[in-house]
C-alpha cells in the first residue's frame, strides 16, 4: 500500500481508471496523424455526439427524467467557451493555448451546469410530460436569448472561433464522460439514480432524496453537454442560434432511445450509428429527414426498449 | 383586437391538444401539423371551389373550410389509428416520442419538392376584406371573422361535449377509461371521434391563421402549435374552458409584448417563460384541478 501511495499511477489505478488512461493516451496519439478532412470532421462529430448522448442518458435513461432541452445546455457551453477563447486567445502565447482551451471548455461546462441547476431545481416538482415541456421551453428560451445577444453575434451567429478541437481532445473527453457517468451510476451513491427512476416513492421511503438525485443528474448532465458544446464551437468555428433548436435536442434524445435508456455502452453505439447515418443518406438528402422520422416511429413501435439492448430486459 | 383574434386562434388549437390529452393523456405533437395541413388543403381546394362558387365570398369560404375540416378530421383519425393506437398500452413516454416522430414525418414529407415544397405560398383570399371604424378603433374584417367563428365553434363544442350522447361518452372516457368501457362505451370509437373533432378544429384554426398570416409553408404550424400547447397547459390541460381562456391570455400577452419595443425580439421566449412560471406556481393550470398521486 505504501508503494502505491508513493507512485500514484498507473499501478494504483483500478480497472476502469486504467482504461480511461489508455483511452486518453490513445486518442492523443491518434490525433498526431493526418487524415482526410471530411473523415476527421465526421469522427469528431461522433465524439461530440457520444458526450451529448451519454450525458443525456444520465438524466433520461438512468434517472428517468425526460429532458428535451439538452441542446440548450450545449448552446450555453458552446457560447461561453467560444466567447472566452475569442476574448482571451490573443493575449495568450501559443504554447499555452491548449491550457486556454481546457479552461474555456471547463468554464463552458460550469456555466452549463449552473444552467442545469437553474432548470433542475424548479422543474423537479414536475413529472413526465410537464418536465419534458419545461425543458423544451428552456431550450427555446436559451435560443431566443442568444438570438438577441449582440455580444455573441445575435441572429447572425458567432464567427471566427479558433480551431482548437482535435481528435485527441474530443475522444479524451468522450472517454472521460463515459468514465464519469459509468462510475457515478455504478457507485453506491449512484444506485440512487436508478432507484429514483424505478420508483420515486419507494426510493424516498428507503432514505433516498429524489430531489437531490434529480438535481445531481441535471447538473452533471448539463456540465458534459456544456463541454460538448465547447468542443463543437471550436470544431465548427462558427455558432448560430438555429443550430441549437428543438431538433438538435430530439437528435440527442433519439440517440439515447435508440441505444436503450440507461445503457451507456449501447448509447455510445447509437451515437456512432446516428452520426454516420445522415452521412450515408447524404445522396438521398431529400428523403433524409423523412427516413429519420419514420425511424423514430418504427423504433417506438417495434423496439421501445432500444435497438441495441439484448438480455437484461428492463422490468418496467 | 389583433391580440383577441390571435388568442382565439390559439384557443381553437389549444382545444385540440386538451381534448386529446383528456382522453389519452399524452401530448399530440402532430396537432400543429394537422393545422398546417388544414391551411394547405384550403389552399388547394380554393381553386376547385372557385369554379362552382364565387370566391371571395362567404358561401365559398364556408365550403372550402368544410371540406378542409372533413379532410383533416379523416387525417387525424388516420394518424391515431396508425401511430397511436398500436401503442395504447405502452408507457406514455413511448407515445410522446412517437408523436414527435409523426410530427417530424409530416413536416418533412410536406417540405419535399413533390409534395408542397418548402417555400412560402400566398394564401388565396377566401373572404372579402374591409376595415370597420369604431370610434378611433380600426377593426379588420378578418379579425372579426376569426372572433365570430371562434365563438360559434366554442359554443358548438360546448354543446357537443355537454349535451350530446357522444360528448357524455367522451367525458366518461376522459374521467375513467376502464369504467367507461365497463359501461358499454366503445373506447376506440370515442377516441377516433375526439381526434376527428380536434383535427377539424385545427383545420379551421389553420385557415383562420392563414387568413391573417402573409403566406403558408409546411412549418407554419409549429409556432402557433407551441403557443397553443402552452395555452392548453396554462388553462389546465384536459380542461376545455381552460384551453379557451389560456389561448386568449397567450394571444393578448404576445400582442402586447410585441408592442413594447424592448420585448418584441423576445416574443418567442415570452410564451415559454409564462408557461414555466405557471407550472411552478400552479402546476395544474389556471382552471385545472390539482391531483394527488396515490401510491
Image (spheres, rainbow, N blue to C red):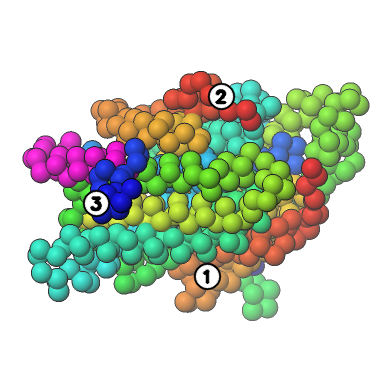
Q: Nearer the viewer, residue A70 or B274?
A: A70
Q: Residue at x 46, y 46 (%)?
A: A184
- Please give left or right for residue A86 compared with residue B5 in the image: left
Secondary structure type for disc 1 = helix
Instruction: Report which quarter residue B157 is drawn in.
Output: top right
Q: Nearer the viewer, mark 3 or mark 2?
A: 3
Protein chain holding label 1: B
Contact, mark 1 vs mark 3 (Cβ under 8 Å):
no
Image coords of residue B21 (percent x, y): 70, 42
Instruction: Report which quarter residue A6 is drawn in.
Output: bottom left
Instruction: Point out the stretch of residues depicted in magenta.
Output: A17-40
Q: Nearer the viewer, residue A59 or A158?
A: A59
Predominant secondary structure in magenta? helix
Contact, mark 1 vs mark 2 (Cβ under 8 Å):
no
Label 2 neighbourhood size at 10 Å, few (<14), some (14-19), many (20+)? few
Label 1 sits on residue: B258
Furthest toward the bottom, the residue is B136
Label 3 sits on residue: A7
- Magenta stretch encompasses residue B197: no
Secondary structure type for disc 3 = loop
Quarter of the C terminus of chain A within the rendering = top right
- Please give left or right for residue A220 compared with residue A86 in the image: right
Protein chain holding label 3: A
Protein chain holding label 2: A
Label 1 neighbourhood size at 10 Å, few (<14), some (14-19), many (20+)? some
In three-dimensional space, the C-alpha distance between marks 1 and 3, rounded to whole angstroms, equals: 65 Å
Label 2 sits on residue: A313
Image coords of residue B22 (percent x, y): 75, 41
In three-dimensional space, the C-alpha distance between marks 1 and 2, rounded to whole angstroms, equals: 51 Å
Q: Nearer the viewer, residue B45 or B277?
A: B277
Q: Residue at x 61, y 68 (%)?
A: B253
Residue A77, placed above or below residue B58: below
Amino acid at each position: 500500500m505504501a508503494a502505491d501511495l508513493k507512485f500514484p499511477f498507473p499501478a494504483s489505478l483500478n480497472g476502469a481508471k486504467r482504461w480511461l488512461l489508455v483511452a486518453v493516451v490513445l486518442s492523443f496519439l491518434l490525433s498526431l496523424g493526418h487524415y482526410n478532412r471530411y473523415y476527421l470532421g465526421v469522427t469528431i462529430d461522433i465524439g461530440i455526439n457520444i458526450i451529448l448522448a451519454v450525458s443525456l442518458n444520465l438524466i433520461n435513461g438512468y434517472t428517468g427524467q425526460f429532458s428535451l432541452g439538452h441542446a440548450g445546455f450545449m448552446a450555453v457551453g458552446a457560447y461561453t467557451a467560444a466567447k472566452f477563447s475569442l476574448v482571451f486567445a490573443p493575449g495568450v502565447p501559443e504554447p499555452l493555448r491548449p491550457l486556454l482551451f481546457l479552461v474555456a471548455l471547463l468554464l463552458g461546462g460550469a456555466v452549463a451546469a449552473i444552467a442545469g441547476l437553474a432548470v433542475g431545481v424548479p422543474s423537479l416538482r414536475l413529472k413526465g410530460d410537464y418536465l419534458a415541456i419545461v425543458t423544451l421551453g428552456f431550450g427555446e428560451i436559451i435560443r431566443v436569448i442568444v438570438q438577441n445577444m449582440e455580444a455573441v453575434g445575435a441572429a447572425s451567429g458567432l464567427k471566427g472561433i479558433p480551431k482548437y478541437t482535435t481528435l485527441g481532445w474530443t475522444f479524451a473527453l468522450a472517454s472521460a464522460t463515459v468514465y464519469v457517468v459509468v462510475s457515478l451510476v455504478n457507485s453506491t451513491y449512484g444506485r440512487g439514480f436508478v432507484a429514483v427512476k424505478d420508483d420515486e416513492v419507494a426510493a424516498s421511503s428507503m432514505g433516498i432524496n429524489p430531489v437531490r438525485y434529480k438535481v445531481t443528474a441535471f447538473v452533471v448532465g448539463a456540465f458534459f453537454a456544456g463541454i460538448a458544446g465547447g468542443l463543437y464551437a471550436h470544431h465548427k468555428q462558427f455558432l448560430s442560434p438555429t443550430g441549437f433548436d428543438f431538433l438538435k435536442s430530439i437528435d440527442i434524445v433519439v440517440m439515447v432511445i435508440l441505444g436503450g435508456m440507461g445503457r451507456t455502452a449501447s448509447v455510445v453505439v447509437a451515437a456512432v450509428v446516428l452520426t454516420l447515418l445522415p452521412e450515408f443518406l447524404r445522396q438521398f438528402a431529400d428523403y433524409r429527414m423523412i427516413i429519420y422520422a419514420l425511424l423514430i416511429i418504427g423504433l417506438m413501435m417495434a423496439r421501445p426498449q432500444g435497438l441495441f439492448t439484448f438480455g437484461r430486459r428492463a422490468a418496467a | 383586437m389583433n391580440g383577441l383574434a390571435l388568442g382565439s386562434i390559439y384557443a381553437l388549437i389549444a382545444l385540440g391538444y386538451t381534448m386529446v390529452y383528456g382522453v389519452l393523456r399524452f401530448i399530440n405533437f402532430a396537432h400543429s401539423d394537422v393545422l398546417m395541413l388544414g391551411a394547405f388543403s384550403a389552399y388547394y381546394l380554393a381553386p376547385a371551389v372557385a369554379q362552382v362558387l364565387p370566391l371571395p365570398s362567404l358561401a365559398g369560404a364556408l365550403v372550402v373550410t368544410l371540406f378542409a375540416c372533413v379532410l383533416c378530421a379523416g387525417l387525424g383519425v388516420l394518424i391515431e389509428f396508425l401511430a397511436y393506437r398500436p401503442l395504447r398500452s405502452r408507457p406514455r413516454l413511448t407515445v410522446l416520442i412517437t408523436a414527435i416522430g409523426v410530427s417530424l414525418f409530416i413536416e418533412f414529407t410536406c417540405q419535399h419538392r413533390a409534395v408542397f415544397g418548402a417555400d412560402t405560398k400566398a394564401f388565396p383570399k377566401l373572404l372579402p376584406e374591409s376595415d370597420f371604424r369604431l370610434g378611433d378603433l380600426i377593426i379588420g374584417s378578418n379579425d372579426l371573422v376569426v372572433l365570430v367563428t371562434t365563438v360559434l365553434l366554442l359554443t358548438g363544442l360546448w354543446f357537443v361535449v355537454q349535451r350530446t350522447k357522444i360528448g357524455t361518452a367522451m367525458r366518461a372516457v376522459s374521467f375513467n377509461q376502464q369504467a367507461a368501457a365497463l359501461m358499454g362505451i366503445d373506447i376506440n370509437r370515442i377516441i377516433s371521434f375526439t381526434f376527428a373533432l380536434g383535427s377539424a378544429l385545427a383545420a379551421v384554426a389553420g385557415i383562420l391563421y392563414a387568413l391573417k398570416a402573409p403566406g403558408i409553408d409546411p412549418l407554419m404550424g409549429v409556432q402557433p402549435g407551441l403557443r397553443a400547447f402552452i395555452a392548453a397547459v396554462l388553462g389546465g390541460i384536459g380542461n376545455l374552458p381552460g384551453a379557451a381562456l389560456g389561448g386568449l391570455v397567450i394571444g393578448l400577452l404576445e400582442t402586447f409584448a410585441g408592442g413594447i419595443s424592448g420585448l418584441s425580439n423576445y416574443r418567442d421566449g415570452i410564451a415559454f417563460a409564462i408557461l414555466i412560471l405557471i407550472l411552478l406556481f400552479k402546476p395544474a393550470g389556471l382552471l385545472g384541478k390539482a391531483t394527488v398521486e396515490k401510491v
